[in-house]
Image (spheres, rainbow, N blue to C red):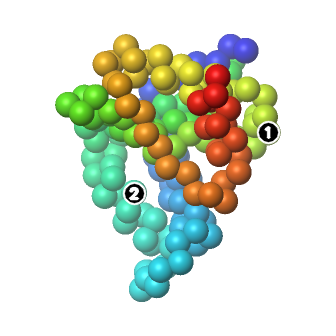
Amino acid sequence: MNIVLKRMSEGDFKNYFENKIERYSNVLSENVHEVSSEEPLLQSRKLLNNLLPEGLKTSNHYLFNISEDDKLIGFVWIKVDKEKKSAFLYEIIIFEKYRGKGYGTWVMKNIEDWLAREGVLYFKLHVFGSNEGARKLYEDWVLK
């Protein structure tokens, strides 16, 4: 495996962000059951714009492409709070055809190593119960 995490360029970010809006809209539709006057796509765009008001330049947010031999295989989005020595994993996504091959575990381990070098002591995340793939990845990563 020749996998690398590389910071996104502005062009990468624009593609990622538009894709993320659609994916997040689907997640909201499937998992959030409170009544909202907004369509999930609009709600998703608004929430993500609030989280990343300066796009790729939003402070303390780190967005990476995951590549293997120059093939894009996924993305990672992390927020680091150095004052609290904590980080929050907003997203790790491995494209479907690359899942189940150890890429996610490799990425989580490398993120963990990077955060340790940055002085981060706490690494948090959230996953919807219906996301079995993510739950398995996180459980496997924690148990290793």
Residue at 33 percent across and 18 percent down: it is 118
Q: Secondary structure at mark 2?
A: helix
Furthest-front residue in this view: 143
- Image coords of residue 55 (percent x, y): 34, 46
In the displayed structure, 40 sits above or below 23; it is below
Type of the residue with mark 1: Lys
Please rate how many residues cluster around mark 1, counting C-alpha atoms within 10 Å: few if below 14, some from 14 to 19, many from 20: few
- Image coords of residue 70 (percent x, y): 65, 21
Q: Nearer the viewer, residue 8 or 135?
A: 135
In the displayed structure, 139 sits above or below 32; it is above
Furthest-left residue in this view: 83
Residue at 59 percent across and 26 percent down: it is 107
- Image coords of residue 2 (percent x, y): 68, 13
> Number of numbered discs present?
2
Which quadrant: the C terminus? top right
Per the image, the residue denoted by label 2 is 48
Per the image, the residue denoted by label 1 is 97
- Image coords of residue 112 (percent x, y): 48, 23
Please rate how many residues cluster around mark 2, counting C-alpha atoms within 10 Å: few if below 14, some from 14 to 19, many from 20: some
